[in-house]
Image: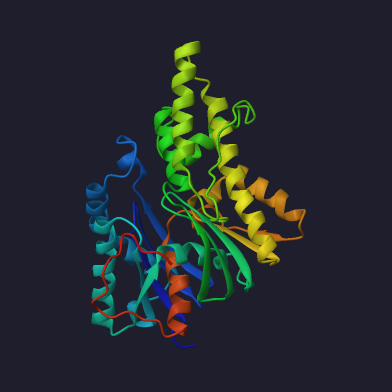
Amino acid sequence: MAGDLILGIETSCDETSAAVVSGGRFVKSNIIASQINLHREFGGVVPELASRKHLELLDRVIKKALDEAGVGFSDLDGIAVTYGPGLVGSLLIGIVAAKTLSWSLGLPLIGVNHILGHIYSNLLEHPELEPPLLCLTVSGGHTDLLYTEEWGEYRILGRTRDDAAGESYDKVARFLGLGYPGGPAVERIAESGDPDRFSLPSPNLGEDRFGFSFSGLKTAVINLAHNLEQKEGQIPVADIAASFQKTVVDILLERVERALKDYPVDKVLLAGGVAANKYLRRRLQESLEKKGVDLYYPSLEYCTDNAAMVAGAGYFLLQQGKVSSLDLDAYPQLKI
């Protein structure tokens, strides 16, 4: 099949990744060079450092992806690259590399929306998946709920108005002194906490029935911790973390349950970095089982930012004739 073998490049934030995927669903290689240790001392990603590290690593990561897949540049049918959303400097490193390969090899260049990549990550382990379906994408930069009747056509039902769910995890973790990255840190300590000890607010977005907002919840957690410290002289970190996590998941589940009433599908996909959260997976699984709806989510490797999901999405875009020109630019605020 023309356009079968795609090289994917992902540099939207702090993972330098390259992958080779066949047919949009079968991973030949997926190389990820994480920068977590580089940014940990700063409590978050430093954009300038991230860009420099991508520049240092990307050539080697691409070579390793090709070697592990057992293919050469001449075997490829297209070059897929994330062009947004993300950190502009980081995005540009990947885009320039992809343009160079596309031009020099005479291969199609396929710009991929990072959020779209997360959606397609489920196909890498569940190649039988077909629409119609709902997808909840939850990551450090995005919280989106969408409906699709066919690949390539998406209806955004709701997205976050401010902080994404993963971003709120990071900010709460930083405030509570739990370290970086915040999601796994909060999840770990929440296991020993009481999720029902504190009642935290959920957003009222009026007619926006499927929208999200986590900024107010983050502020409520900070205010609660300050008040408890002043009154009791200490902060019950585990109980606060557990109550915060329960509230986040309650909000996510409520939106999915609302969507299923309007869009009665039998499949729900979970994607994005926060999809690795075991508490979220369990709660969502329990909720959907009662409704006879199947839940799909990728393994940890494909939850975090990775190039295999970019290559997978790129394959389907190429089949639809959605290729990019060599003036492809970075769009840090790109939406579906």
Query: How many numbered callouts?
Result: 0
**Residue 279 position within the rendered picture, expressed as x and y whole percent measured from the top left:** 62, 42
Can you give x and y, in whole percent of width and height, for residue 238 in the image? 55, 26
| Residue 288 position within the rendered picture, expressed as x and y whole percent measured from the top left | 71, 55
Image coordinates of residue 53 in percent, x first then y, are 25, 52
The scheme the figure's colours follow is rainbow
Give 292 or 160, whichever is nearer the viewer.
Answer: 160
Q: Residue at x 28, y 65 (%)?
A: 330
Q: Using the image, determine if residue 279 lies above or below residue 117.
A: above
**In the image, is residue 314 above or below residue 210?**
below
Q: Is residue 254 visible?
A: yes
Q: Where is the C terminus found, in terms of image quarters?
A: bottom left
Task: Pick the residue in front: 111 or 246.
Answer: 246
Residue under the point 34% across and 47% down? 35
Question: Residue at the location (77% across, 60% down)?
Answer: 292
User: Above or below — where is 93 with respect to 165?
Assistant: below
Q: Is residue 212 above or below residue 59?
A: above
- Depth order, front residue of 81/218: 218
Question: Can the viewer see residue 59 in this picture?
Answer: no
**Residue extending furthest bottom?**
2
Position of residue 20 in the picture relative to residue 158 (left or right): left
Where, by quadrant of the figure, is residue 70 drawn?
A: bottom left
Question: Which quadrant holds residue 31?
Answer: bottom left
Residue that extends furthest to the front in the rendered view of this protein: 206
- Which residue is at a point 46% across and 65% down the rendered structure image? 117
For residue 7, what is the image quadrant? bottom left
